[in-house]
Image (spheres, rainbow, N blue to C red):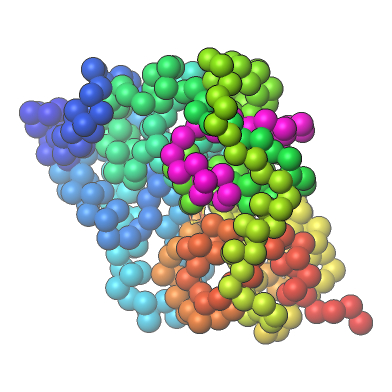
């Protein structure tokens, strides 16, 4: 492959993996059985996938993709032709991923449906929530990949053996004492925001979480730790799969070095996120993509309500989740309230450019961080709904 005998695209993918392996002193390449490329539909993404596809490369193992955009939906409701250049880059990127035989899941939660690694499986997953989720909650083994290294691993079916592919590197590095009241996904987002910012890079071990987090709480924690920090994995002894006790999580004496998180830190973190108060023009939910439980929750909150005419309300999810939500009856109350359910799309895409300068509201600190609109309020989903529906007569 490195000599080019399998084509130029495969050769380029192998060159990248060999260079990474050399940089990290890996001793050998090991097989990986699935990959997730956090495709962005932006220039850097296009450059690499185009080079591989034009060189005849194809995915030798199942390789899913991140959201790019639901072009057809946006074309129906706003004129995305005004954003011609960015749309064209995204469109080309999508076509090259199809050509290279990636699975066009276009979801940032592929580990729930389209691409689920098993315990002990070596994989190559990029995407902020995906890497810590598959390492910590599922017990698969992946490094914190980039779009390009994950795609290269998808093409080759191998990755250099270093970092989190080695058991000895998967132990905790810092203790996080949680004394805050973690009542919903939103509070886990705030916890993730605080921990990522204060640790930077490392493997936190959480102490004090007494109730098993729900799937969306895990996802929110994972996503936010990798917005403000670089956290490839974490342990919640007794709940995540690789450590039953704090001692096991560290595999040595529990370090004295620790951070504590109380309600005060969460409130302070929340306050730092707010750049708007008062009236809003737009609500964006689903960053990361909403899962089925979250679709049920927003349907329950919107049932029988109407979104105000001066507010546009968007719920981002995966195509798979949308189908299941419709079958479960969650789609109708959301759409009858006047909200859009949008699939395949990331909040960091050109499709939202027409919202620039508008005041937004979201339950996702990550969305607030990458916002394509103007000032933003961040609050729980219930508060987002309350701020955008008509008052009861
Ligand atoms: Fe998903 Fe994009 Fe947010 S990939 S997590 S919707 S920034």
Q: Residue at point 50% right, 82% down?
A: 357
Direction right: furthest residue = 393
| Residue 249 inside the magenta-drawn segment | no
Give the answer, above or below, for where 124 lies relative to 278.
Answer: above
Q: x, y percentage for residue 181?
A: 77, 45
Q: Residue at point 43% right, 65% down?
A: 349
Give the answer, above or below, for where 352 lies relative to 45.
Answer: below
Residue 378, quarter of the rendered image: bottom right
- 375 on left or right of 200: right
| Residue 212 inside the magenta-drawn segment | yes
Would residue 78 be seen by someone viewing this image from the given angle?
no
Q: Quadrant of the C terminus?
A: bottom right
Q: Residue at point 65% right, 40% down?
A: 260
Magenta residues span 193-213
Residue 368, quarter of the rendered image: bottom right
Closer-to-camera residue (152/75): 152
Q: x, y percentage for residue 18?
A: 19, 29
Q: x, y percentage for residue 385?
A: 75, 67
Closer-to-camera residue (177/356): 177
Give the answer, above or below, for where 83 lies relative to 340.
Answer: below
Q: Quadrant of the N terminus?
A: top left
Direction bottom: furthest residue = 310
């Amino acid at each position: 492959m490195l000599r080019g005998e399998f084509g130029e695209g495969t050769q380029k993918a192998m060159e990248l993996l060999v260079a990474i392996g050399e940089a990290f002193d890996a001793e050998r390449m090991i097989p990986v059985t699935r990959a997730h490329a956090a495709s962005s539909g932006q220039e850097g993404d296009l450059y690499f996938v185009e080079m591989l596809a034009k060189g005849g490369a194809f995915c030798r193992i199942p390789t899913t993709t991140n959201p790019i955009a639901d072009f057809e939906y946006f074309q129906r409701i706003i004129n995305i032709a005004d954003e011609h250049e960015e749309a064209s880059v995204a469109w080309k990127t999508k076509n090259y991923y199809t050509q290279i035989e990636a699975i066009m899941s276009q979801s940032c939660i592929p580990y729930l449906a389209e691409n689920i690694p098993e315990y002990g499986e070596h994989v190559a997953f990029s995407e902020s929530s995906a890497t810590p989720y598959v390492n910590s909650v599922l017990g698969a083994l992946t490094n914190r990949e980039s779009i390009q290294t994950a795609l290269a691993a998808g093409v080759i079916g191998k990755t250099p053996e270093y970092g989190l592919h080695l058991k000895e590197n998967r132990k905790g590095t810092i203790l996080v004492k949680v004394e805050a009241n973690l009542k919903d996904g939103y509070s886990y987002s705030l916890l993730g925001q605080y921990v990522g910012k204060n640790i930077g890079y490392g493997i936190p071990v959480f102490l004090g979480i007494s109730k098993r987090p729900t799937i969306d709480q895990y996802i929110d924690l994972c996503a936010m730790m990798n917005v403000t920090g670089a956290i490839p994995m974490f342990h919640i002894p007794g709940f995540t799969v690789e450590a039953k006790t704090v001692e096991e999580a560290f595999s040595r004496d529990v370090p004295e070095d620790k951070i504590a998180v109380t309600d005060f830190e969460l409130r302070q973190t929340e306050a730092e996120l707010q750049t708007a108060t008062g009236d809003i023009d737009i609500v964006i939910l689903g960053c990361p993509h909403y899962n089925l439980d979250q679709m049920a929750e927003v349907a329950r909150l919107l049932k029988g309500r109407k979104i105000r005419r001066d507010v546009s309300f968007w719920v981002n999810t995966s195509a798979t989740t949308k189908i299941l939500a419709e079958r479960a009856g969650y789609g109708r109350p959301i759409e009858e309230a006047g909200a859009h359910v949008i699939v395949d799309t990331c909040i960091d895409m050109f499709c939202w450019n027409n919202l620039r300068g508008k005041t937004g509201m979201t339950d996702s600190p990550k969305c607030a961080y990458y916002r394509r609109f103007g000032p933003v309020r961040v609050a729980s989903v219930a508060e987002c709904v309350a701020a955008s529906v008509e008052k009861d007569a």
